[in-house]
Amino acid sequence: MTDTAPRNNRFFLVPMRPRDASESNRAASTLELFFDLVFVIAVSQASTSLHHMLAEGDWAGGLPRYLLAFFAIWWAWMNFTWFSTSFDTDDWLYRVLTIAQMGGVLLFAAGIEPMFTEDSFALMIAGYVVMRIAMVLQWLRAATGGGPTRRTALVYAAGIAIAQALWVAWLFVPESPARTAFLIVLVLCEIAVPVVAESAGRARTPWHPEHITERYGCFTLILLGESLLGSANAVFSARADVDSLTSLVELAVLALIVTASLWWIYFWPPHHRAIGSFASSLRYGYVHYIVFAAAGAFSAGIEVEIAVLTGESELFELAASFTVTIPIAVFILGIWWIAFRGNADRVVNTVVPAGALLVLLDPLIPVPIALSTIVCIAIVAVLVVRRPVPEDELPNDQLSDQADASA
């Protein structure tokens, strides 16, 4: 991003005012891409820890911890992403606060394994609070820019700060059902902050549809890349532990094809059409939690399958296969729900969700993820033949949403 805004000569800062939502050629900045890379470490830690607990057969302990860790990863990333589409100044203070958030991500990542293995949340929450306090400072700076979004920015800052105080307080609550209930309330408080802030202010913060959806696309690529890396590392490590490399090679090839298919499916619809109104932007942002979590869990499932092949897992083959097929199905259904439905014809809107459900039958056949691979290829083939519905053929309510976004 080229900074052409006037600077404060004393502090070399750009006034933090809302960006133009219709700005031409808006793209992800190098700082945003750098920011995303740090999350690779946290995603890798969460996925690896999930793999170990699933391989031990402890899905009841591993899955809730993974979902909690991924909530923090997704929420911190998403909050920064929507803030940056509205207020990115790219001056030195904005960069320093962003890098401080990145430090919080690293601290958070260091706390993921202790959370899984020792039930210790202190380090992970410390990192999360560092990330979120940096966002409080960003919102306070946005509030000083004045204008109609001042009150909205202040509500964001206050809401995030209160939530962080509650996270710290939660650490001191003894293990009990009340602690679990408190945790659920905390998560609900966090996701309520944008709804309250955007409703309480004189004006909502603007968002750039193409920029936002590009950012989500970039993070999806990171998650799919992490799946490939995790799968490849598991295959490399298992070479000496299997009697025949045939099954291992088959699994590696199928994992690559499925990952490529998920990429193809994700980027088929025009995502920017999905966030025309405030309600649709919330749906798009929030449902991506399950999409991102599923993408991160996919590599854990592949690693579990490999652990079964090498005799290092306590899971039965049927259960191990479900650790792969459920993430695939959830990923496809999530994307269909938020990006396909209003942009695809009846054929695509039938094939995609039906294919996702068919993937769940894969564990019933003897070849790991073979049916999933065939179904994913079939979905991609349909998408190649069909095209997204042209904008001039969209329903009136969708056209109205898009008009709202560009206003």
Image: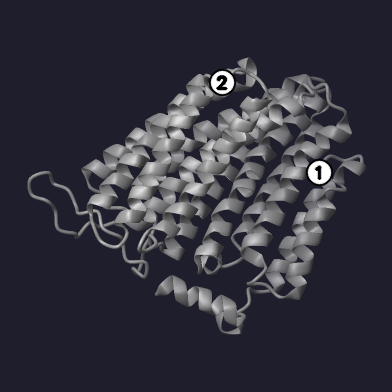
86, 384: nearer the viewer: 86
Image quarter in which the C terminus is found: bottom left
Please, what is the three-letter code of the amino acid marked with disc 2? Val
Please, what is the three-letter code of the amino acid marked with disc 1? Ile
Q: Which residue is mark 2?
A: 173
Of discs 1 and 2, which sits in the foreground? 2
Q: Position of residue 389 (x, y in %)?
A: 63, 77
Q: Residue at x 19, y 60 (%)?
A: 4
Mark 2 or mark 1, which is nearer the start of the sequence? 2
**Residue farthest bottom in this picture:** 392
Q: Residue at x 45, y 70 (%)?
A: 405
Q: Which residue is mark 1?
A: 369
Q: Position of residue 8 (x, y in %)?
A: 11, 51
Q: Residue at x 23, y 42 (%)?
A: 93
Q: Position of residue 171 (x, y in %)?
A: 52, 22
Question: Does residue 39 lie above or below 177 as drawn?
Answer: below
Q: CA distance from mark 1 to mark 2?
A: 43 Å
- Among the 4 quarters of the image, the one containing residue 381: bottom right
Q: Residues within 10 Å of mark 1 (few under 14, many from 20)?
A: many
Point out which mark residue 313 bears: none
148 to the left or right of 364: left
